[in-house]
Image (tube, rainbow, N blue to C red):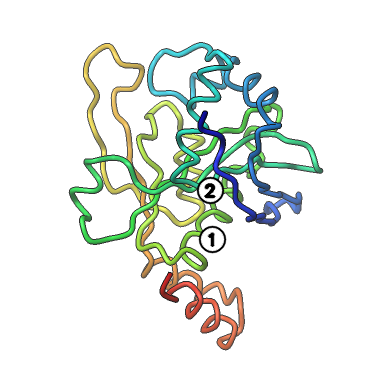
Amino acid sequence: MVKLKQHEVTLEGKTLQGRSIRLRPMTEDDWDILARWNSDPEVLYYSEGDDVTAYTLEDVQGIYRSVSQNAFCFIIEVDSKPIGECWLQKMNLERILQKHPDLDCRRIDIMIGEKQHWGQGIGTESIRLLTEFGFLKEGTDMIFGCGIADYNIRSLRAFQKAGYEVVSKLKQTPGRKADYIYDAALTKEKFFENFRAADSVSPEGFRDELSEANRPR
């Protein structure tokens, strides 16, 4: 049986309001909380493109175990309590791979499962942490937020606040929940331009990070 692919990456940051955010590796001990989030119809309304109201535990395990084979999967913690999940995954959408055949493209997916934490900047900070990890440590070329539904304005804004721009607007077939879905993206060049402008690290530190990000693997 395939298990969650493990990694040892932990990412930490703060929201604009000063709340501490920690992304720690997702493990096989997280099924109870993942199953609860994935059986909440309101949470799934925003996280799923189709009219899914609940997943079984078997469904949940199959989804995350499959994704983890090509992704870094995390549990989002606030004040040491799990409130959501996210991942940085190798791109798996043909419409994007065909546009960028020579680039290392990744995607970020995120779910805030504890609804009392919606609208608090946690999604934006989690996206920012995954983005920095993708560009600075993984050396990827382009990162996307994919298939963001037109009714999920909160998610689209979270990506935009993290520096992403809408690169495509796709009309959906009649009868789907969304009339349109959006792909948002950030290139390596734009990320480093913003990174320099923010003066996040000294010039020497920036060169060290850049060198590490582009080191052959």
Q: Secondary structure at mark 1?
A: helix
Q: Nearer the viewer, mark 2 or mark 1?
A: 2
Point 61% across, 43% down: residue = 74
Give the label on residue 72, or none.
Answer: 2
Name the amino acid type tagged 2.
Answer: Phe
Q: Do the residues bearing badges 2 and 1 touch, measured as CB atoms within 8 Å?
A: yes
Name the amino acid type tagged 1.
Answer: Phe
Point 48% across, 43% down: residue = 157
Above or below, 105 against 51 in this view is below
> Which quarter of the picture shows residue 122?
top right
Give the label on residue 159, or none.
Answer: none
Point 49% across, 19% down: residue = 45
In terms of depth relative to the viewer, which is nearer, 124 or 29?
29
Above or below, 209 against 52 in this view is below
Number of residues whose C-alpha sits closer than 10 Å to that of mark 1, classed few (under 14), some (14–19) or many (20 or more): some
CA gap, disc 2 and disc 1: 10 Å
Residue 72: % across, % down? 53, 48
Give the label on residue 133, or none.
Answer: 1
In terms of depth relative to the viewer, which is nearer, 130 or 35?
35
Residue 114: % across, % down? 68, 27
Residue 23: % across, % down? 66, 48
Number of residues whose C-alpha sits closer than 10 Å to that of mark 2, classed few (under 14), some (14–19) or many (20 or more): many
In terms of depth relative to the viewer, which is nearer, 136 or 19?
136
Point 26% across, 38% down: residue = 169
Which numbered disc flags the more N-terminal residue, 2 or 1? 2
